[in-house]
Image (tube, coloured by chain):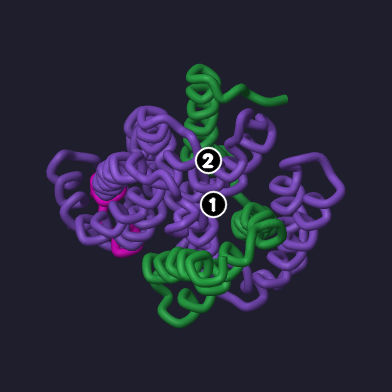
């Protein structure tokens, strides 16, 4: 019997399948986001295979959209690394929150489970953990369902996007910006987060005008992160279930 | 330093992204098994994860045409009203398309 104080964790096929089923309603929405990414990536000049490969291997929507913004005739390496790391750094906190649970899994299972760590399955798995559940199937099964949906959506987007020759006319060039902005607003928990975001906006603006091309990403991210250090301790937590 | 957008360059870029993303996914557990992540580091990461999105959107806001700017405003308003990303994104795309069809 699992009780909230019980320790231990296990991973099996039944729990993974249950996790996939519980994630199914959310995964349907992910198909729509994947579709948007597929269209945006193809319009940006990525080949069909590259687009699908990015969704399959990276499996992190916001960073994939953001990288499209710096994807031109050349791909600036530092900006690519900085963008990917900074946007996905939230995973560090999510993983840390699950550590007391996952430490009971064999090492190989533990690090394999984390391959599909994403926002929605993390939130549901963290909830399971708090309720004393031992089975980590929600993390793995939920993650697999999200991954599959993201890939199916991307495929539909690639097929659909290849047929459009005049993306600006239909407003399709703004998908990336609109997606990132909606993620930003959706992730805001406290008004005080506007302080680091304003600092980031100002720093990025300065970098755009006067610093080398593409430096605005890392300059803005670091400036905003440093500004966040001065916020009150409770006011910055958007990983609500992290503690 | 930059990669050319040849098939090989693009593949390398995707593999680098995949590697870094996995490091963030596994890093939290890996670090916690040695030292716990403190509240200051948590504040920094939380503020940085939103700030990088702000920074990435800035060029569109500063250098984009009025259709793109209107799309961002429409997304922001729709998001604040509905809290539903798909509706907000649709509002943004529609605004840009309408602006360009009617105003140019």
Name the residue located 78 percent from the left edge and 62 percent from the top edge. A202
Relative image position of residue A173 (x, y in whole percent): 50, 53
Name the residue located 16 percent from the left edge and 54 percent from the top edge. A21
| Span shown in magenta | A129-141
Q: Are marks 1 and 2 in contact (CB under 8 Å)?
A: yes
- Where does label 1 land, which residue? A90
Name the residue located 67 percent from the left edge and 69 percent from the top edge. A233
Name the residue nearer the viewer: B86 or A230: B86
Q: Is residue B70 left or right of residue A225?
A: left
Q: Is residue B96 above or below residue A7?
A: below
* Residue B92 in sight here: no
Quadrant occupied by the N terminus of chain A: bottom left
Q: Is residue A124 left or right of residue A63?
A: left
Residue B24: which disc? Answer: 2
Name the residue nearer the viewer: A49 or B22: A49
Q: Is residue B41 left or right of residue A121?
A: right
Name the residue located 58 percent from the left edge and 62 percent from the top edge. B68
Residue B42: which disc? Answer: none
Q: Is residue A124 left or right of residue A170?
A: left
Q: Which chain is purple?
A: A
Name the tint of chain B in the rendering. Answer: green
User: SS at mark 1?
Assistant: helix
Residue A80 sits in which quadrant? top right
Relative image position of residue A128 (x, y in whole percent): 29, 59
Residues indicated by labels 1 and 2 sit on the same polypeptide chain: no
Q: CA distance from mark 1 to mark 2?
A: 8 Å
Relative image position of residue A22 (x, y in whole percent): 19, 58
- Binning the other alpha carbons within 10 Å of mark 2 as few (below 14), some (14 to 19) or many (20 upward) gives many
Name the residue nearer the viewer: A218 or A52: A52
Q: Residue A113 magenta-drawn? A: no
Q: Is residue A26 above or below residue A9?
A: below
Residue reaching furthest to the right: A210
């Amino acid at each position: 019997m699992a009780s909230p104080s019980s320790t231990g964790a296990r991973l099996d096929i039944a729990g993974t399948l249950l996790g996939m089923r519980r994630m199914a309603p959310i995964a349907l929405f992910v198909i729509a986001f994947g579709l948007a990414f597929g269209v945006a990536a193809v319009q940006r000049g990525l080949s069909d295979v590259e687009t699908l490969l990015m969704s399959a291997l990276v499996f992190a929507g916001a960073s994939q959209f953001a990288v499209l913004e710096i994807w031109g005739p050349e791909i600036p390496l530092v900006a690519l690394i900085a963008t990917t790391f900074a946007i996905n750094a939230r995973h560090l906190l999510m993983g840390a929150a699950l550590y007391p649970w996952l430490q009971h899994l064999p090492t190989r299972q533990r690090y394999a489970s984390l391959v599909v760590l994403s926002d929605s399955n993390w939130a549901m798995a963290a909830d399971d953990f708090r309720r004393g559940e031992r089975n980590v199937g929600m993390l793995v099964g939920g993650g697999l369902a999200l991954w599959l949906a993201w890939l199916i959506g991307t495929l539909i987007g690639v097929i659909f996007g290849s047929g459009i020759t005049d993306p600006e006319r239909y407003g399709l060039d703004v998908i990336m910006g609109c997606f990132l902005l909606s993620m930003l607003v959706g992730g805001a928990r406290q008004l005080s987060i506007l302080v680091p975001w304003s600092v980031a906006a100002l720093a990025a603006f300065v970098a755009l005008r006067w610093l080398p091309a593409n430096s605005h990403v890392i300059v803005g991210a670091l400036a905003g992160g440093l500004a966040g250090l001065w916020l009150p301790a409770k006011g910055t937590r958007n990983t609500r279930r992290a503690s | 330093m930059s990669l050319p957008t040849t098939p090989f360059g693009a593949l390398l870029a995707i593999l680098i992204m995949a590697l870094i993303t996995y490091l963030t996914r596994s890093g939290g557990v890996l670090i916690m098994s040695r030292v716990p992540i403190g509240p200051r580091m948590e504040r920094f990461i939380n503020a940085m994860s939103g700030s990088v999105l702000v920074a990435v959107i800035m060029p569109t806001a500063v250098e984009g045409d009025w259709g793109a700017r209107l799309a961002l405003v429409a997304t922001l308003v729709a998001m604040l009203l509905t809290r539903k990303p798909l509706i907000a994104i649709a509002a943004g795309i529609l605004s840009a398309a309408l602006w360009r069809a009617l105003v140019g």
